Image (tube, rainbow, N blue to C red):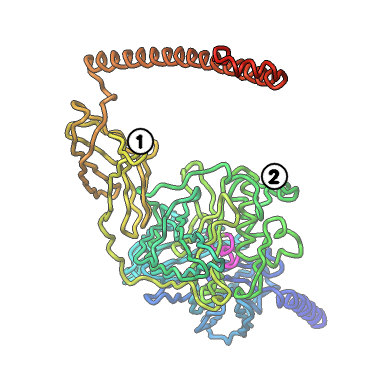
Amino acid sequence: MSLFQNQCKQLKRIVVCVFFLLLSNILITITPIFAQTTTPSGSENFTIDLKSTYTVTATGKTIVEQKFTIKNKTPELFVSKYGIVASSTNLSNISVTHNGKNLEPNISKSTGQTSIGVTFADPVVGEGKSNELIISYSDQDIALISGKILEVNIPKLNDQYQYQNYQVELRVPSIFNTPSRINPSNFTLSQDGDYNVISYSNLGNQSISAIFGHQQLFDLKLNYYLQNPTSQTALTQITLPPETPTQQVYYLHLDPLPKEVKEDADGNFIATYEIPANNSFYVKLLAQVKLQLAPSQTIPFSQVLPEHTTPQKFWESQDEEIQKIAASLDSVQAVYDYSVKTLHYTTKPLDQFIERLGAKAAIQEKNLFEATCQEYTDLFIALARNKNIPSRRIVGIAYSSNEELRPSNLNSDVLHTWPEYYDQTKKAWISVDPTWQSTTGGVDYFNNFDLNHIALAINGVSSTLPHPAGSYIGASDEQNKKIYLDFAKEEIPLPNPDLEVNLIAKKIAGIEIPGNYELHIYNKTGKTWYLATINAVGKSSELILDQNKKPSKILPFAKLTLPLSVYNKQDRFQSDQITIDIIFKEGQATTHEFNVKPSLNLQAPRAEQVLVVGGGLILITLLAGSLFLLGRKLTSSLRRQGQKLEEQNQQLQILSTALKENQQNDPTRQRDQISNPRQRA
């Protein structure tokens, strides 16, 4: 009997040893803000419950507690080792307890990751017995306090199905109030002392994204280096930060002022400068940028163009391989997910030159692990355009507190790119960031875009133009920093409308044309003003502004030119005074008065005016016709008389010539003619 017991014990030791060997190579992986697990070998032998608690402090540090309850389902097998991998190197105060006893963790760090492993000193054996493992640490990358905004992102579990129960508790200081936007919305809210507690009971495979605060303010400084090495004056253009429904820009200072500022088809603000021959200078811009979650009702979205679904360089939407991939994707979300999962961010430093590959080259096997934000963006756009989804590229600044998780390098003026697509249901352009979702391990940047992306240029009609700020450098300028960004301490009050309005009479050969004018409106401020209407009223005149040419906005330091016709209601030669009211969507209005010389009223004629004008026109027409016919007759008569005189002259010349010849050939006759004066006469 004792021999049999010894053999059973040896067999159990062998089984346990084999299990330990299998288990020693398996870790429960956790991104900086969530637990992503692979269960020990033989999941049918254990059940695992996980409760994750994230406590955000007022300084933005997050204290994480991952509580695992591992229950044995068999009497023979038990767990002796466990571990997690956190995709962050910003961990501190790491501690581990097993069933209430402190254990010394094994910690190792690699590129962007921290591994935490532990060996149980007292393994728990027996069916129904449980291990309670608590791994705690502080993490700087879970919550981000940037300016006036707190952002918290908890990505979904990749292996959620391996958990019997998964609960999440997010504790946020009540000074941040309740979230302005949070997803998913099936949470319960409670209060515990100075903390608001957001709880999810069965989160499943959903991620959590929460933003506390409605808007973000940045102070922005840009330097553009413009150079003209030629011997003639040249014109060049730069792209100023555009304004969109979620991005408002106030230009505090722009020096020197441009020759003109216009908006292109994609909504870019294009400034034109004149550069003297063999000269160069800097254009310096100081601006405050306000990003907001809810789109402004005042600022319209830029229009959707046919070019937003066509192939372009880097967006090879009709490539055979691109078409094949797109055929398997049934939505814009699927296009986004494919870009995130297929490409892998490069390990090359961002301050060195990295060639833009484009969508077609990005999906080649050799380039799958060499992607930058450009490849993620280009692949998304090419696939979206293949499915006839309007899409385009945004080039700009993405503020990041951790460049390993959210790649960005403003110290070297390295810009970030991300795509946006047009949502036909919302009638809006929607920004997404597949790059940062990939590098953060699953933060949802498709449904929950943040307040840290500032657009500097929009590429839609072209895949490369216009160039953003940071691209305007000379041969000796590469070491000079061109982009400065910081959180604004306070919002600068916006100015009141300050317009220079003039009414210019149209002229022909230096003579003014009565009733024909051009209305010139110059915006002297660095704010974009959105026009509700422009009304023109005269005391005794009727005014017409071309409705088709009325703009919806006037850009900073830009000029508008509108044709204006003035018709006098009573006396065509009587001067009049008119009033121009410019009303803005923001609620302000400006009034301007001018003296004009109207022309004849042709817009609402009276009966006597019709008779007089009609009779006059008929009389003038008849008189003009009669004069025309008379002129033609006189001209024809004179032409015929001229022709007859010319023929007579020719005949006289011929006769004269013949007489001279006869005289020269007959000397006797010549003498008779000379001696006979009567004949000579």
**The C terminus - image quarter:** top right
Q: Classify mark 1: residues with Cα within 10 Å, few (<14), some (14-19) or many (20+).
A: few
- Residue at the far front in the pictured view: 675
- Of 107 and 475, nearer the camera is 475
- The first of marks 2 and 1 along the sequence is 2
Count of picture labels? 2
The type of residue carrying mark 2 is Ala
Q: Which residue is drawn at 46% across and 43% down?
A: 427
In percent of width and height, residue 587 lies at: 25, 48
Q: Residue 528 at what x, y percent from top left?
A: 35, 54
Q: Please state if 555 lies on the left or on the right of 131 as rendered.
A: left
The residues tagged by marks 2 and 1 sit, at their Cα atoms, a distance apart of 47 Å
Check disc 1 and report the residue beneath it.
546
The residue wearing badge 2 is 327
570 with respect to 461 (left or right):
left
Which of the 4 quarters of the picture holds residue 230?
A: bottom right
